[in-house]
Image: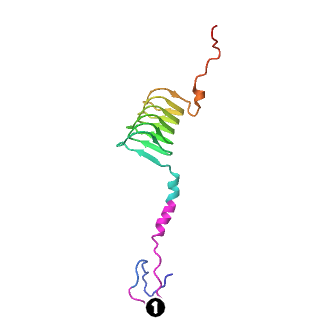
């Protein structure tokens, strides 16, 4: 609650009068407003931050030897000697992976020496792939290089993939 004085200037919220005035009753200073602002800001940002997926970035300065696994997205710009598994895996144009790459979606702009197994695969014009690509949906841009097989078998069991034995073969006897 603010009391009015005969002075026409409005009081500033962070200043206190040094001499008591005889025209009004002093009240305790108002509670600071600043602690509320960060809380309100955090409440505004947190729902947005919770809905955006996180991306783990392997920078071009990093070289990893071993398996890399994440439950979220991965952006690879460096080198990995081992298997990579994530939701969405993007292999940058200067990146190199020596091993298998697994994910719901894999976008290759760099080099993979191994296999890719994903529901959706995108090979950009700078992609260099040495190995098989097991997919459900594939996009290959002009200029991409593939040395291996592209098989639309993602999600099928291994029993269905194995070739069936011929039924008409009867042993001679």
Residue under the image location 58 percent in, 25 percent down = 162
- Residue 55 in magenta? no
Query: In this view, which residue lies farthest toward the bottom?
Result: 22
Vertical order, 113 against 30 (above or below): above
Vertical order, 28 against 160 (above or below): below
Q: Is mark 1 on a helix, strand or loop?
A: loop
Q: How is the image coloured?
A: rainbow
Residue under the image location 48 percent in, 49 percent down = 54
**Foreground pick, 157 / 134:** 157
Residue 64: name its quadrant.
top left
Q: Position of residue 50 (x, y in %)?
A: 52, 54
**Total numbered circles:** 1
Q: How crowded is mark 1: few (under 14 residues within 10 Å), some or many (20 or more)?
A: few
Q: Is the magenta stretch mostly helix, strand or loop?
A: loop
- Quadrant including the C terminus: top right
**Foreground pick, 77 / 15:** 77
Residue under the image location 42 percent in, 82 percent down = 9
Residue under the image location 61 percent in, 19 percent down = 165
Q: Where is residue 153 in the image (x, y as percent from the top left)?
A: 56, 30
Task: Please state the extent of the stretch shown in magenta in the rendering.
Answer: 18-44
Query: In this view, which residue lies farthest toward the front?
Result: 173
Q: Position of residue 134 (x, y in %)?
A: 52, 31
Query: In this view, which residue lies farthest toward the top?
Result: 173
Q: Position of residue 4 (x, y in %)?
A: 47, 85
Q: Name the residue under label 1.
A: 23
């Amino acid at each position: 609650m603010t009391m009015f004085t005969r002075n026409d200037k409005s009081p500033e919220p962070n200043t206190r009068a040094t001499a008591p005035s005889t025209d009004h009753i002093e009240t305790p200073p108002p509670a600071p407003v600043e602690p509320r602002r960060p809380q309100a800001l955090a409440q505004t940002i947190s729902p947005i931050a919770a809905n955006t997926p996180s991306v783990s970035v392997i920078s071009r300065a990093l070289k990893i030897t071993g398996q890399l696994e994440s439950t979220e997205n991965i952006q690879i710009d460096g080198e990995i000697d081992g298997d990579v598994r994530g939701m969405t895996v993007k292999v940058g144009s200067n990146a190199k992976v020596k091993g298998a790459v697994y994910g719901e979606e894999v976008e290759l702009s760099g080099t993979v020496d191994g296999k890719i197994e994903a529901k959706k695969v995108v090979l950009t014009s700078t992609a260099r792939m040495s190995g098989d690509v097991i997919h459900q949906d594939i996009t290959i841009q002009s200029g991409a290089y593939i040395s291996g097989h592209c098989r639309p078998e993602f999600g099928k069991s291994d029993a269905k993939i194995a070739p069936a034995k011929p039924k008409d073969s009867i042993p001679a006897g």
